[in-house]
């Protein structure tokens, strides 16, 4: 197994500086890289990468023989993996078969370890045999992201509509302001040095219900004065993500979904800088 731990979180932008795709780039060797992204956008991302290959001798192909797994510590009962020592997990991963690559998530540490394996590998079964105490489920990782306030994929980052900072890319180690020219750089730099960043993706908690209706796409979120402060991006039961004017939300007694008698709370993630303001980006340069 290759044990190089190099990985980067990044966004692909269009010429207007809008987000097309978010991805994690994994270095396997000096000649080979893996692009980890939302599979629902596979055909579009593939075409996008081929378009910028130009005349370079680079082979770009979708891989259908690999899977992505995530292991993370339990921070809230019932949603996360119960391993008490991530270092022990790393030691075990170094000895496991069928693992192509593993790396700590480059965004924030609470997202745990990201593992790329061959399709026929069963990490779940292997961890059971190792004696680790854990629980798993298909919705656990999505709930973790929602509770942390981390968007991912086409559903949370509508292609061609989101501005980079609205996805919190500047807080998730996904942008460099010293890098050379790239597509969408002008708008990104302007947002950092000139414009304010009023809206950001935030974790939301819906009022508890036995069941929830199907909300319309980008359902408006109103404050206690019935003024729009943002939109619902996605949710799984009670937890979800909203694109919100975070400073306005802090001034409101409650928020609600337009057209529904359902209230909600917007939470400020603990991993956000304490000095975060819409009209200042000092947090980007803080040590």
Image (cartoon, grey):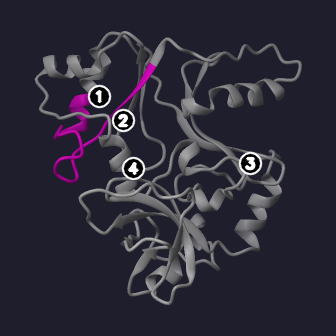
Q: Earlier in the sequence, mark 2 or mark 1?
A: 1
Q: Earlier in the sequence, mark 4 or mark 3?
A: 4
Mark nearest the camera among 2 and 3 is 2
Residue at image point 39% right, 50% down: 145
Point out the stretch of residues depicted in magenta.
Answer: 67-89
Measuring from the top left, give residue 65's x and y in whole percent.
Answer: 49, 11
13 vs 272: above or below: above
Q: Is residue 227 left or right of residue 241?
A: right
Q: Earlier in the sequence, mark 4 or mark 2?
A: 2
Q: Residue furthest right?
A: 55
> Mark 2 falls on what kind of element?
strand
Residue at image point 83% right, 47% down: 181
The residue beneath circle 2 is 113
CB under 8 Å between callouts 2 and 1? yes
> Mark 4 falls on what kind of element?
helix
The residue beneath circle 3 is 179
Cα separation, mark 2 vs mark 3, equals: 27 Å
């Amino acid at each position: 197994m290759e044990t190089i731990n190099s990985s980067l979180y990044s966004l692909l932008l269009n010429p207007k500086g809008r987000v097309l795709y978010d991805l994690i780039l994994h270095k396997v060797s000096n000649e080979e890289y893996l692009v980890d992204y939302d599979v629902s956008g596979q055909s579009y991302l593939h075409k996008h990468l081929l378009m910028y290959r130009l005349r370079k001798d680079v082979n770009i192909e979708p891989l259908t023989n690999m899977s992505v797994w995530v292991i993370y510590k339990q921070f809230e009962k019932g949603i996360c993996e119960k391993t008490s020592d991530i270092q022990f997990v790393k030691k075990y991963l170094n000895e496991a078969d069928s693992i192509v690559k593993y790396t700590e998530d480059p965004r924030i540490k609470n997202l745990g370890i990201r593992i790329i394996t061959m399709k026929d590998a069963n990490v779940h079964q292997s961890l059971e045999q190792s004696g680790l105490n854990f629980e798993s489920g298909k919705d656990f990782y999505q709930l973790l992201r929602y509770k942390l306030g981390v968007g991912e994929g086409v559903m949370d980052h509508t292609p061609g509509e989101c501005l980079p900072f609205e996805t919190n890319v500047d807080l998730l180690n996904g942008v460099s302001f010293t890098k050379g020219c790239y597509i969408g750089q002008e708008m990104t730099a302007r947002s950092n040095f000139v414009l304010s960043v009023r809206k950001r993706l935030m974790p939301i908690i819906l009022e508890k219900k036995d069941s929830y209706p199907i909300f319309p796409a980008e359902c408006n979120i109103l404050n206690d004065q019935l003024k729009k402060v943002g939109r619902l991006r996605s949710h799984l039961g009670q937890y979800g993500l909203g694109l919100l004017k975070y400073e306005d939300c802090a001034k409101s007694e409650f928020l609600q979904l337009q057209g529904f008698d359902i209230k909600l709370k917007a939470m400020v993630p603990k991993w956000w800088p304490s000095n975060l303001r819409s009209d200042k980006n000092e947090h980007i340069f803080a040590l």
